[in-house]
Every structure is written in structure tokens, then in C-alpha cells.
Amino acid sequence: MTEIPDPLPGDVVEAIERGDKLIAIKLLRTATGAGLKEAKDAVEAHGRGGASTARSAPSGSRELSANVVEALDQGNKIEAIRRLRAETGLGLKDAKDAVEGKAPAPTSDERRGSGSLGWLLVAAVLLVAAYFFL
């Protein structure tokens, strides 16, 4: 994730001055790759006349905390992403990418399990349809 520049890009500043806060946030996120919270905080800080206070992650790889790794070890990727975002202020995409870099790939049994549930659902629908039409 890149740092939010200070001062903000010109088009972002223009949008803030016009009162288009949502457009400014979108432009800032597009320009920097910042998360929603970081971009919102930076736009609001600029609107108040202050410097950007948004937290940003250093470039390069990041070691995940024991708290995040614990959630991954329990097989709960969503909780790991939530914990990482709470700890670092990363945006959703950046936290997801960081966690997925550490998350184990699903096994063939896990992939097969979700497919068999789909076939079971299809069979149930066919049985119900056969009951009503026959």
C-alpha cells in the first residue's frame, strides 16, 4: 500500500473545495491505492485544514501478528482479515491480499465438499419438481 501524499493531489483538493467529499475520496483511493478509511480520514483532515493523518502500511512484505496468524490457524480467514485491519488500519483489499499470502490453499477434499453440496441441492430440487409434476 502506498503512502497518502501530503499535500493531496490537485484533483482531490479541487473536489474537496467543491464540496464533493465522496468524489475526493474516490479520486484519492484511485490515485494512491489507499483503503476507504485512510482516504476518508485524509480528505476530512484536509477539509479541516490539517495534514493527512491517515495511517498507511509500509511498502514491502509485512509479518502478520500472532493474533492474525491464530485466526488463520483456526481456518477463519475473514476473522484474520478483520484483525489485521483493526491492528494496522489497512484497507480491505490490502488486508485480504496480506492474509491470503499466508493462508493455506484449500485441499481437494474441501473443494470437493462444496461441490457435493451443490449436487445435493440440485437433486432435492429435481425431487420436488418430480413430486409436483407426476
Image (cartoon, helix red, strand yellow):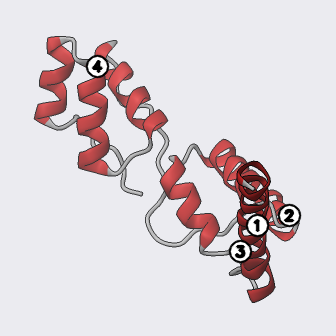
Q: Distance between the residues labelled 1 and 2?
A: 38 Å
Residue at horizontal 27%, vertical 38%? 28
Question: In the drawing, does residue 16 fall left or right of residue 54?
Answer: left
Name the amino acid type tagged 2. Answer: Glu
Residue at horizontal 73%, vertical 71%? 119
List the residue tagged with mark 3: 115
Is tag 2's residue or tag 4's residue first in the polypeptide sequence? Answer: 4
Residue 99 makes an appearance in the image = yes
Contact (CB < 8 A) between labels 4 and 1?
no
Question: In the drawing, does residue 35 fall left or right of residue 51?
Answer: right
Contact (CB < 8 A) between labels 1 and 2?
no
Is tag 1's residue or tag 2's residue first in the polypeptide sequence? Answer: 2
Is tag 1's residue or tag 3's residue first in the polypeptide sequence? Answer: 3
Tag 4: Cα neighbours inside 10 Å, few (<14), some, or many (≥20)?
some
Q: In front of the other: label 2 or label 3?
A: 3
Image-quadrant location for residue 108: bottom right
Name the amino acid type tagged 1. Answer: Ala
List the residue tagged with mark 1: 123
Question: Which residue is nearer to you in this view: 40 or 77?
Answer: 77
Q: What x and y, as percent, mark residue 129? A: 71, 54
Name the amino acid type tagged 3. Answer: Gly
Q: SS of the residue at dot 4?
A: helix
Q: SS of the residue at dot 3?
A: helix
